[in-house]
Image: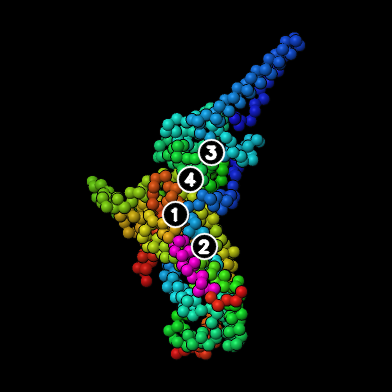
Amino acid sequence: MSQSYNRGLIEDFGRWREFSAGMWAWIFHKFTGWVLVGYLFTHIAVLSTALSGAAPYTNTIQALESLLVVRILEVGLLAVAVFHILNGLRLLFVDLGVGLEAQDKSFYASLILTGVIVVASVPTFLAGVSI
Amino acid sequence: MAERYTSFEPGGTRWLWQRLTAAFLVIVLAFHFFLLHFVNHADEVTFAMSQARMQELTYFSLMILFLVTATFHGVNGVYNALVNQGLSGSRKTAVKAILGIASLVLIVQGVRTAIAWAGGVPI
Amino acid sequence: MSTQVPEQVEDESSAESVSPGKQKRDAKKRERAERLQEQREAEAAEKARTADDTYHLKVFRYDPEVEGKQEPRFDDFYVPYKQGMTVLDALMWARDHYDSSLTFRHSCRQAICGSDALFVNGSQRLGCKTQLSDLSEPVRVEPLPHADVVKDLVVDMEHFYDQMEAVEPYFQTNSLPAEDEEQRQTRENREKVKMSTRCIWCSACMSSCNIAAGDNEYLGPAAINKAYRFAMDEREGEDMKQRRLEILEQEHGVWRCQTQFSCTEVCPKDIPLTEHIQELKREAIKNNLKFW
């Protein structure tokens, strides 16, 4: 072999239109995972305002929660968390060797269920916010 | 590949713990969201309410366990993602160290906050 | 249509001995003949393009040794369709009628040798096992992704074979039967390893695996399935199973599998690869828990 040709990234994400259910499930699970771990760090950072006393904490949280952007981001967070939970359950079953033939259907089911739960939660998540 | 034979390779241990923490987190994260968004509403959060919850030993210890498992699950997930992308050698060691320190900082900060709320460990 | 580098075959040695007039006439004649030839080729190509019973193939071309082909490109081939024609049949027709330099690996043409795994319309398939009638046109034929291309549709399989070798893909045992006995396997045990024995080393699964693409040390689905075939074979005995699990439970063994199911979906022999990998993960865990 004298030389060879490497086709680079075009073989991976350039082909997203051809991805199958299992691949999408993996991509969404990774993406939601990154978001959640990022949130975990910011969450603890915001909560640790409690270290400087009751008033600073209450003020910080209430100031944040009164912003519409924060509420919308929270709905996004809920979507991310619910998907990660439901697809996580799917993956636990896959790890136990249960229902591997239906892995694509269980992925679609977790997507739909995520959508339903998120839409149903929007009123609760936006309650009492001043626009 | 396959030049090193050891009887116990941590790859399997971490895989197992990732699943065990997952099973725990599925329940606790759902509970966490439910309690803090549906039972208690976002616009009504005050220091006093968090304080009241945290002074319960059960709730306090559940939250500490939640923090530790979530940190492990999240950071281990990040590490796995990087190894899957072919991270190796000294960069792998460096990443491992950084992630380890970050986890430790996160857990310490979380525990300090929980103790601040509870006003000491509620025993 | 032809993609060969134009040949420079000019007969000039005989030109000196003939009169200038004849030379001129000959040149004119040749020119006319060439024009006619070009016209005929264009007509044939046009006919093939518009005919109902042809298939339009777009084939990846690359050859580092030929100047005009160092930059990868796609060539169009219009192949007359016959009932039952496979992608491999079409490629062979194109090679035989249009461009003899079109290069691809193939041998048995019946999904046994595992030579002609290709990337057809966005997924890994065996050329000989894929009916043209199941594909939408144009049929895009490319070499397997996540492997270096050597020429046209041929990829370098060395890494794949290395990973296969790493799991010791052959029967080994410490408990041989008595002198005049056969090495019998129970029907149940045979049934258990049945699907895993079907692997033809075509590398379609390895090529489809996103993790194998990123982590070069990952054993990959084919090698793990091969290990499964022997680890689950009861005739190899406990010692050997232990040895096999030790290979598999390294960091770049079974744990890297992310259950994307890509391999299971592309396997031309319908081997439940993900299921086998998952079972080996559980075996490895159970095996380690025993020591605690």
Task: State whether residue C53 appears in this view.
Answer: yes
Instruction: State how many labels appear.
Output: 4
Q: Alpha carbon of mark 4 to alpha carbon of mark 1: how far? A: 13 Å
Q: Which residue is mark 3?
A: C138
Whether the residues at callouts 2 and 3 have beta carbons within 8 Å, the answer is no
Residue A118 lies left or right of residue C42; in this view the side is left
Magenta stretch bounds:
A110-126
Spot occupied by residue B77 in the image (x, y as percentages of width and height):
51, 66
Above or below for A48 versus B98: below
Task: State the predominant SS element of the stretch in magenta.
Answer: helix
Q: Which circle, 2 or 3, is nearer the viewer?
A: 3
Spot occupied by residue A93 in the image (x, y as percentages of width and height):
39, 63
Mark on residue C261?
1
Indicate the secondary structure of the residue bearing disc 2.
helix
Whether the residues at callouts 3 and 1 have beta carbons within 8 Å, the answer is no
Badge 2 crowding class, 10 Å Cα cut-off, few under 14, some 14 to 19, many 20 or more, is: some
Chain under disc 4: C
Q: Which residue is mark 4?
A: C124
Q: Quadrant of the C terminus of chain A?
A: bottom right
Who comes first in sequence, dot 3 or dot 1? Answer: 3
What residue lies at 45% left-to-right and 83% top-to-bottom?
A: B59
Mark on residue A30?
2
Mark on residue B65?
none
Q: Which circle, 4 or 3, is nearer the viewer?
A: 3
Q: Alpha carbon of mark 2 to alpha carbon of mark 3: how far? A: 34 Å
Who comes first in sequence, dot 4 or dot 3? Answer: 4
Indicate the secondary structure of the residue bearing disc 3.
loop
Chain under disc 1: C
The amino acid type, in three-letter code, at marker 1 is Phe
